[in-house]
Amino acid sequence: MPQGFNLPFVLSVAGALLTSAVVASVYIWPFVRAMPRHDALRLLAAFHAFRFLGMNFMVAGFVSPELNPDFASQVGWGDLIAATLALISMAALSWESPIAIPIVWIFNIWGTLDLLNAYYVGATKIQNPGLFGAGIYIPALYVPLLLVGHAVAFMLLLRPGSKAQKS
């Protein structure tokens, strides 16, 4: 096994991703695809509005003091930007603004790339996921849920001529 490879952590993340995808396909997708597009996207954005939780990576005692502060800062600020974009998306969708869908695209692209980047940097630069301390639940559970939420949003954004499109 490569140094820094933590099989229990990887299996935990993989399990959360698989379970999130199954739950989304069985319960979430049928529900949101039947909704008006703006309403469904607003609901998905609301879940992402809680991404400010990533700021906790910069809180003393939440993570190990040995965790790379540049990584913690990147995670925290990236998540705060994503949460802000989610809230802006929710507002634009609620007001039925003509720029609502482009804003959702920006939020969804930013949010997805931010999460994938955090996983990449974490996997390549953080040798011990135990350094996440109390924040271990974020990459192990919350991030897989968020990634699946982004996937569902992309499916709605790319779905032409559907009931979800008309709104």
Image: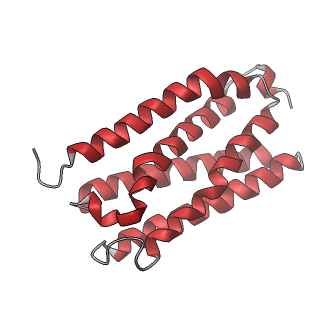
- The image shows residue 16 at horizontal and vertical percentages of 42, 38
Quadrant for residue 52, please give it.
bottom right
Q: Residue at x 34, y 41 (%)?
A: 12
**Quadrant of the rendering where the N terminus is positioned:** top left
Compared across the picture, whether 35 is left or right of 50 comes to right
Quadrant for residue 82, please give it.
bottom right
- The image shows residue 73 at horizontal and vertical percentages of 44, 73
Compared across the picture, whether 1 is left or right of 164 comes to left
For the rendered model, the colour scheme is secondary structure
- The image shows residue 89 at horizontal and vertical percentages of 74, 52
Which residue is nearer to you in this view: 150 or 12? 12
**160 over 13 or under it: above or below:** above
Compared across the picture, whether 25 is left or right of 144 comes to right
Viewer can see residue 98: no
**Quadrant of the rendering where the C terminus is positioned:** top right
Q: Residue at x 81, y 37 (%)?
A: 39
Which residue is nearer to you in this view: 160 or 82? 82
- The image shows residue 164 at horizontal and vertical percentages of 78, 26
Compared across the picture, whether 127 is left or right of 161 comes to left
Q: Residue at x 73, y 39 (%)?
A: 41
Give the mark count.
Answer: 0
